[in-house]
Amino acid sequence: GVETVKKEIDESVLGQTGPYRRPERLRKRTEYSGERAKEQRVFQANEEAMGMVLHKDSKWYQQWKDFKDNNVVFNRFFEMKMKYDESDNAFIRASRAVTDRVTDLIGGLFSKTEMSEVLTEILRVDPSFDKDRFLKQCERDIIPNVLEALISGELDILKDWCYEATYSQLAHPIQQAKALGLQFHSRILDIDNIDLAMGKMMEQGPVLIITFQAQVVMVIKNHKGDVVEGDPDKVLRMLYVWALCRDQDELNPYMAWRLLDISSSSTEQVL
């Protein structure tokens, strides 16, 4: 059952240690389902149901956007986080410990009560949920699969992990590049500083907002092998903010989290 699958995944995914390694094969979010879940999915895939799901997806995404755009504290949080995390100023680097406290403070303003509501709602469906374990799952499973799919243009993987509106937004530039015959040769060198920033209850379920950094080499080549975008000798330090929403109808925690929103900023890293 789900528990056995969960134990196997825990051992294979969360048991990894050491430097970042690209997954041998990128997995879809829905790949860890048991046979019964697969049957149900096939059974449900009629046009009317699919239309309703897409409609719900876009409605929820719009609600999320409205919340994000109209929440002053939320936006201040990201501005400050971006500013401090990106800065190469020695003074600001030295004061990062203070920044973390500022982050805690803004998180507090944002509402400790709301975070506990979110965690309570998650625990209702997944009694074994644990914040540190979730961050480890993000580090070893969710982030590598989604980010690798994003930088290598693997749209079927990306689509499976994202809400429809989020997928459309991320897929558009990839589809344009592919239409021009361009090839993706980007690489992720490392993922670190993963943190749970805040939680928000939305109509579609509990949302957890994580921040993390990644070292990425961005390279896109044309059919002749010439680099048309990026630089194979430059390492970018990316700061990402992801909003992950839990599907409360899904019991398996390794299939339950979908990407609702993504924002990023980058600075060139001096080697």
Image (cartoon, grey):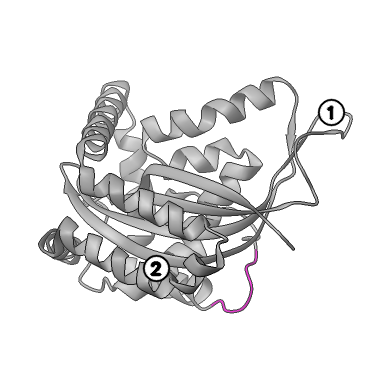
> Which residue lies at the image location 24% right of the left edge and 26% below the top edge?
52
Q: Is residue 69 above or below residue 259?
A: above
Closer to us: 122 or 169:
169
Q: Is residue 240 above or below residue 49?
A: below
For residue 197, side relative to residue 16 (left or right): left
Specify the amino acid type for callout 1. Answer: His
Position of the N terminus by quadrant: bottom left
The secondary structure that dominates the magenta segment is: loop
Q: CA distance from mark 1 to mark 2?
A: 39 Å
Q: Is residue 243 visible?
A: no
What numbered label is drawn on residue 265?
none
> Which residue lies at the image location 62% right of the left edge and 68% below the top edge?
20
For residue 217, side relative to residue 239 (left or right): right
- Range of residues picked out in magenta: 16-21
What numbered label is drawn on residue 135?
2
Q: Is residue 269 magenta?
A: no
